[in-house]
Amino acid sequence: MQQLNDEQVIIIRNRIIADGVTDNDLQNGLLDHYCCFIEEILLTGVDFESAYNTAFQAITPNGMHEIQEELYLILNYNKHTNMKRIIYVSNFLTLSCISTVIMFKTMHWTGAAILFQIALLLLITTAIILFLNSIKHWKSHTAVYNIRVVAGFLAALLITVGVFLKSLHYPTAGFQVVAGVLLLNLVFLPMFFYHLYRGEILNTSKINS
């Protein structure tokens, strides 16, 4: 089997690091896997650059950060499961409270104002929990993903706090709501739905191939 030289090994390692893999053990494991894969391809007579590109496309078509995310989930399964439970419970309570507020407002029942404030508090709490959960493995995500998370959190915070201050008749509340909605509609939602669309396209291409 043809052996890679030191310069080629350094090129592969640098690519692994550049793609966002920060765990040393995972870096070494991926490096060994890539080197073996590339050395086998080199036996067919292709050049290093072609074998290099083929290896990365075959082993990690969606990027290496996904492998680090999966490793993180495996090593922190219990913590991740508990965090998921907290997120689902907080989302459930928030949506339940919001729907109850709508019912109380529609029926003109007393207590709607208090429930509305509770719903806003739950919404802020849920946004903070989701944001803190995302920044725990901030480095393992792409820059685009992190921008989307920050935009979504700021939009939720601005809208929720703005609506709460609006109920108290603060003069700057309207500006906060408008800023939050613009951030939501112009940054977060386009990035979020493009991510869903891109993921669906990749899944479809995998099935067809």
Image: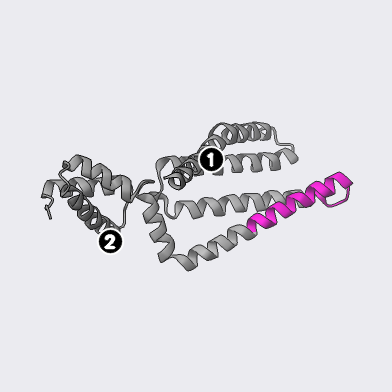
Q: Quadrant of the N terminus?
A: bottom left
Residue 199: x, y in percent? 48, 43
Quadrant of the rendered structure where residue 92 is?
A: bottom right
Please state which amino acid type lies under the numbered disc 2. Asp
Asked if marks 2 and 1 touch (Cβ < 8 Å), the reply is: no
In the image, is residue 162 part of the stretch drawn in magenta? no
Residue 80: x, y in percent? 49, 62
Residue 195: x, y in percent? 50, 41
Magenta stretch, overall SS: helix
Residue 87: x, y in percent? 59, 58
In-front residue for pair 75/47: 47
Q: Quadrant of the C terminus?
A: top left
148 horizontally vs 116: left or right: left
In-front residue for pair 56/132: 56
Name which residue lies at 22% across and 44% down. 51
Q: Please give the range of residues in magenta.
A: 90-112
96 horizontally vs 25: left or right: right
Q: Is residue 19 visible?
A: no
Mark 2 or mark 1: name the one nearer the start of the chain. 2
98 horizontally vs 87: left or right: right
Please state which amino acid type lies under the numbered disc 1. Phe
Name which residue lies at 44% across and 40% down. 144
Q: Is residue 14 visible?
A: yes
Name which residue lies at 55% across and 60% down. 84
How packed mark 2 is, by other alpha carbons closer than 10 Å (few <14, some 14-19, many 20 or more), is few
Quadrant of the rendered structure where residue 168 is?
A: top right
Q: CA distance from mark 2 to mark 1?
A: 32 Å
For label 1, the residue is 192
How packed mark 1 is, by other alpha carbons closer than 10 Å (few <14, some 14-19, many 20 or more), is some
Helix, strand or loop status at disc 1? helix
For label 2, the residue is 25
